[in-house]
């Protein structure tokens, strides 16, 4: 059924394959109970008996029980559908408090914050689906209850700071972005302890004070969102060895950060790419294993300290164009496991080849 720029009534129709209403059309379906496919209709469409939609749905029915595809609605209407039990994906404009504890969501919950709305979103403590949050202006206006473990996490804010203290574990990827980050804007995941997938955090200030394990990859900064401050005080492990050596599992841009320190990091099961930027120091004092390539590159005139005192395992070291860097003594312990093709230094203040390092000539004049 398609209705465009007109009105139509179907007083005896109980089931149909699909419905599309557009161009200000209007339809009345007083006894319709089932749509086996999608129902692309405005919420004002009369469907008082509708119980099941097999595909996507954007309308309203007080008797609605299940939507197989994406269900788009406003939170105030959602509270008026007490029989709703199951959706494939829920996309909600959050303008009023709503509880989703008993709603079975298949793949994803997408939340769009309504401007100036102060409300609570309550979900289960643990959920397998992804949680996507699009903040409009003031993230603190939404109180999240539940959602301690989620299938994946994505949050976006144009300007300001994002704080998501309710999340403890993420089974997939964790991506938090301040799109036009300014000095002082930040991302804080206060209680996050484990992410099985990739962590991507883009803001001037980044803080994950309890994050211990990242299963796939850590990527920090992109485009105009390079960070100034990074706090990962208890991070111990990054990567699982599944990424190709050319796809770093630790990817960090230091164009605005003078000192990078990840004090508790013990193992990186993959490669590392560091864009030197304006950095003066890079320290990982607990790192013992880097099962990949360490690449530090960029036109940098200030990086003078690399500190990896416990490093015992590495596949390759490549450092380029760090003009103030003359001290490579931190790599003395891994020179025996490297060779002339896996030790490459160029464009630095001192450029020792592998033989220089093997001969103990770690520091240039």
Image (cartoon, rainbow, N blue to C red):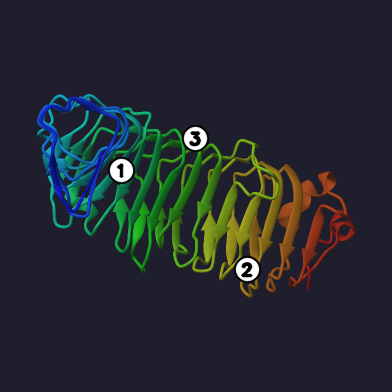
Q: Position of residue 56 (x, y in %)?
A: 30, 37
Q: Is residue 48 visible?
A: no
- Name the residue rendered at 74%, 73% in the picture: 349
**Tag nearer the camera, 3 or 2:** 3
Quarter occupied by residue 124: top left
Relative to 126, is 237 above or below?
below
Circle nearer the N terminus (1, 2): 1
Circle nearer the N terminus (3, 2): 3
- Name the residue rendered at 22%, 24% in the picture: 85
Residue located beneath label 3 in the image: 196
Q: Position of residue 15 (x, y in %)?
A: 22, 25
Residue located beneath label 2 in the image: 303
Locate residue 138 relative to residue 219 in the image: left or right. Answer: left
**How many neighbours does mark 3 have within 10 angstroms: few (below 14), some (14-19), or many (20 or more)?**
many
Quarter occupied by residue 302: bottom right
- Kindly state the secondary structure of the residue where label 1 is placed: strand
- Name the residue rendered at 80%, 60% in the picture: 344
Comparing 198 with 287, the one in front is 198
Tally of marks:
3
Residue located beneath label 1 in the image: 110
Q: Position of residue 215 (x, y in %)?
A: 54, 37
**Tag nearer the camera, 1 or 3:** 1
Asked whether the residues under the numbered discs 1 and 2 touch, taking CB atoms below 8 Å apart as contact, a structural biologist would say: no
CA gap, disc 3 and disc 2: 32 Å
Circle nearer the N terminus (1, 3): 1
Relative to 288, is 219 above or below?
below
Locate residue 205 relative to residue 133 in the image: left or right. Answer: right
Quarter of the image where the N terminus is located: top left
Q: Is residue 65 visible?
A: yes
Q: Position of residue 174 (x, y in %)?
A: 43, 43
**How many neighbours does mark 2 have within 10 angstroms: few (below 14), some (14-19), or many (20 or more)?**
many
């Amino acid at each position: 059924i398609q209705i465009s720029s007109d009105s139509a009534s179907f007083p005896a129709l109980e089931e149909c394959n699909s419905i599309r209403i557009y161009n200000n059309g209007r339809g009345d379906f007083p006894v319709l109970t089932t749509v086996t496919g999608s129902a692309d209709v405005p919420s004002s469409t009369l469907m008082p008996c509708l119980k099941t939609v097999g595909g996507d749905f954007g309308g309203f029915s007080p008797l609605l029980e299940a939507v197989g595809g994406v269900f788009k609605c406003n939170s105030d209407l959602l509270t008026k559908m007490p029989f709703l039990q199951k959706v494939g994906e829920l996309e909600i404009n959050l303008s009023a408090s709503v509880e989703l504890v008993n709603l079975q969501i298949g793949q994803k919950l997408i939340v769009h914050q309504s401007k100036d709305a102060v409300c609570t979103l309550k979900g289960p403590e643990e959920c397998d689906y992804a949680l996507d949050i699009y903040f409009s202006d003031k993230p603190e206006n939404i109180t999240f209850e539940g959602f301690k473990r989620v299938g994946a996490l994505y949050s976006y804010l144009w300007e300001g700071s994002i704080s998501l203290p309710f999340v403890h574990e993420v089974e997939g990827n964790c991506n938090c972005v301040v799109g036009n980050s300014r000095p002082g804007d930040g991302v804080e995941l206060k209680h996050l302890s484990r992410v099985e997938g990739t962590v991507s955090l883009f803001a001037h200030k980044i803080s994950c004070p309890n994050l211990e394990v990242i299963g796939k990859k850590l990527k920090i900064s992109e485009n105009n969102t390079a960070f100034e401050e990074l706090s990962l005080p208890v991070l111990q492990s990054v990567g699982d060895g599944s990424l190709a050596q050319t796809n770093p599992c630790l990817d960090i841009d230091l164009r605005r950060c003078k000192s990078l320190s990840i004090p508790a990091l013990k193992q990186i099961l993959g490669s590392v790419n560091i864009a030197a930027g304006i950095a003066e120091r890079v320290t990982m004092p607990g790192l013992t294993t880097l099962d990949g390539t360490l690449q530090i590159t960029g036109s940098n005139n200030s990086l003078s300290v690399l500190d990896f005192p416990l490093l015992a395992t590495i596949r390759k070291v490549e450092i380029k164009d760090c003009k103030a860097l003359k001290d490579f003594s931190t790599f003395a312990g891994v020179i025996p496991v490297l060779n002339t093709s896996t030790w490459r230094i160029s464009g630095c203040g001192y450029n020792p080849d592998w033989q220089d390092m093997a001969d103990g000539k770690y520091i240039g004049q």
